[in-house]
């Protein structure tokens, strides 16, 4: 890689594809498989299965033929709108949830196995749902099963025209032509060389941004790459202030940072309850659904309970699942059981220590209902996108469904765009790779956790903006310095943190998972 005097990037190698997709989660792989027959290259900075999808435990919320008496897609829509606190796009909610059953059927046809009984697929309930409509796989390993099925299909490609996966390559930036249209992707190879992939369409399916915070349920790859890439390409973002904190992450000590083991919400759906150090119920009287209230409400209730320090414990509460018979718990929640036992906790005999942690980013890159962004040729799907489904707070288990549906819809849009495109060698605008000093990453995460976590106020947000800005000017990249994954990820975290903090400053009312402690009474969402 070299940089010209004008600051342009000269890549070390080039490749071409019809479509380049960044990310190997449910959205990206679904889109890639639906584009069979085109030259599709899927880029991922880690191993192919190293995606947020693999870690999803609870399941997929969907109303199929087998459903609770009285349940319907319309009821699912109502629950989603309630959880989103007035900021969902009703058209997006209706469309995605209505197309969900068909998408699940096609996923099953691709080899995904969901837990079933004599009357069809088994269903459970999570927070915010008024019916049992969450289907699951492997007890609490739904995401892992979906990822397995999709990757198995990709892996059988051979010469069949199915997509190829380029693993261990970090996407740097969306490459634009002189008109501002997306024309490809710059990537960092494991050997440090920088390549250019020319393509007719670019699809961001990069997942979440949990590592903006000190503790998260997200795997290490979730460093807000897609948000930062979209910003640098000139795409619009919305609702980025809405970071959902999962209320029940396994607490193993105050020094345990980074990725934390999730204790799925379905444990509460099966009867577990939250208690404080004195044994008092945390959610009693807080919400009509008590322990199955929407996640923003439960996380906030835990935070407020800890602020009063009952029993002297200020950093965690407990999830009491001991009423669930031990054989049932172990069979239904093998992933949770293994994590607890590894930490020296027997969840069938003692309450599980839990605390909230950054989980799901409800906002992101603005798209239409085909995944198109405000930049021609650039699409975004999955958690990185803001379709309008989630509003101010995601309803549990709607995310995998969104990934499936939007992956399919984006594929239809891309196939049409590729067919309509007249092949030509576009003049590309090649910018230096982004970079910032990775030594500031812990400081950034600590700042975001303290000032932009559950509860924010104007002085804290302004101070955080100043602190984050001092951690690196991402606009100039790293010049001739060595480009590393750590320096690029740090640049992306700085850019995304700045966007989140600015949006949190502008939204002065408390709504959904954005709680302004200096404006504690929720206002009418706008």
Image: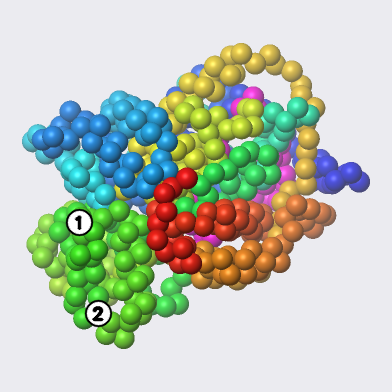
Residue, x 64% and y 27% (percent of image)? 376
Query: Mark 1 vs mark 2: which is more N-terminal?
Result: 2
The mark found on residue 288 in the picture is: 1
Residue 198 sits inside the magenta stretch:
yes
Under tag 2, what secondary structure?
Answer: loop
Q: Position of residue 485 (x, y in %)?
A: 64, 55
Residue 148 sits inside the magenta stretch:
no
Disc tally is 2
* Cα–Cα gap, marks 1 and 2: 23 Å
Are there few (<14), some (14-19), or many (20+) residues within 10 Å of tag 1? few
Q: Position of residue 2 (x, y in %)?
A: 83, 46
Residue 261 visible at all: no
Instruction: Identify the residue position indicated by label 2 in the image.
Output: 277
Q: Position of residue 42 (x, y in %)?
A: 54, 35
Question: In this picture, is 96 found above or below 257?
Answer: above
Q: Position of residue 148 (x, y in %)?
A: 36, 41
Residue 199 visible at all: yes
Residue, x 62% and y 66% (percent of image)? 462
Tell me: 154 left or right of 99.
right
Tell me: 340 left or right of 373.
left
Question: In this picture, is 359 found above or below 121?
Answer: below
Under tag 1, what secondary structure?
Answer: loop
Answer with the quarter of the image where residue 331 lies: bottom left
Question: In this picture, is 442 found above or below 194?
Answer: below
Are there few (<14), some (14-19), or many (20+) residues within 10 Å of tag 2? some
Answer with the quarter of the image where residue 471 lies: bottom right
Range of magenta residues: 186-214
């Amino acid at each position: 890689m070299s940089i010209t005097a004008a600051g342009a990037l000269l890549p070390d190698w080039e490749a071409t594809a019809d479509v380049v997709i960044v990310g190997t989660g449910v959205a990206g792989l679904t889109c890639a498989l639906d584009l069979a027959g085109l030259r599709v290259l899927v880029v991922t900075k880690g191993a192919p299965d190293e995606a947020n999808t693999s870690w999803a435990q609870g399941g997929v919320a969907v109303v199929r033929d087998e459903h609770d008496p009285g349940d319907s897609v319309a009821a699912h829509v109502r629950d989603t709108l309630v959880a989103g606190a007035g900021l969902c796009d009703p058209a997006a909610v209706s469309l995605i949830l209505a197309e969900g059953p068909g998408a699940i059927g096609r996923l099953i046809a691709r080899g995904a196995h969901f837990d079933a009984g004599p009357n069809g697929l088994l269903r459970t309930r999570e927070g915010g749902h008024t019916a049992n409509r969450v289907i699951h796989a492997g007890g609490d390993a739904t995401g892992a099963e979906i990822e397995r099925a999709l990757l198995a299909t990709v892996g059988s490609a051979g010469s069949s025209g199915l997509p190829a996966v380029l693993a261990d390559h970090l996407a740097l930036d969306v490459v634009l032509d002189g008109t501002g249209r997306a024309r490809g992707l710059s990537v960092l190879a494991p050997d440090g060389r920088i390549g250019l992939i020319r393509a007719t369409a670019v699809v961001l399916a990069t997942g979440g941004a949990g590592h903006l915070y000190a503790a998260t349920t997200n795997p290490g790859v979730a460093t807000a790459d897609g948000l930062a890439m979209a910003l640098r390409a000139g795409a619009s973002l919305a609702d980025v202030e809405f970071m959902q904190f999962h209320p029940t992450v396994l607490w193993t000590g105050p020094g345990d940072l980074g990725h934390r083991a999730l204790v799925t919400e379905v444990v509460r759906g099966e009867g577990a309850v939250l208690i404080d150090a004195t044994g008092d119920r945390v959610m009693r009287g807080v919400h009509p659904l008590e322990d199955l209230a929407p996640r923003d409400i439960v996380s906030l209730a835990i935070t407020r309970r800890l602020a009063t320090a009952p029993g002297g414990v200020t950093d965690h509460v407990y999830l009491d699942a001991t009423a669930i018979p031990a054989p049932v718990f172990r069979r239904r929640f093998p992933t949770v059981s293994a994590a607890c036992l590894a930490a020296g906790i027997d969840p069938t005999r003692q309450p599980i220590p839990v605390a909230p942690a950054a989980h799901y980013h409800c906002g992101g890159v603005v798209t239409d209902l085909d995944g198109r962004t405000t930049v021609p040729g650039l699409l975004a799907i999955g958690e990185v996108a803001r379709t309008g489904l989630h509003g101010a707070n995601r309803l549990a288990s709607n995310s995998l469904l969104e990934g499936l549906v939007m992956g399919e819809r984006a594929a239809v849009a891309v196939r049409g765009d590729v067919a309509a495109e007249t092949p030509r060698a576009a003049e590309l605008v090649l910018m230096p790779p982004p970079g910032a000093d990775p030594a500031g990453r812990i400081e950034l995460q600590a700042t975001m956790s303290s000032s932009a976590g559950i509860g924010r106020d104007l002085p804290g947000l302004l101070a955080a903006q100043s602190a984050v800005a001092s951690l690196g000017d991402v606009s100039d990249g790293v010049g001739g310095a060595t480009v590393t994954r750590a320096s690029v990820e740090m640049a992306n975290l700085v850019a995304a943190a700045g966007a989140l903090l600015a949006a949190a400053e502008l939204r002065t009312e408390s709504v959904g998972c954005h709680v302004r402690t200096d404006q504690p009474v929720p206002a009418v969402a706008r």
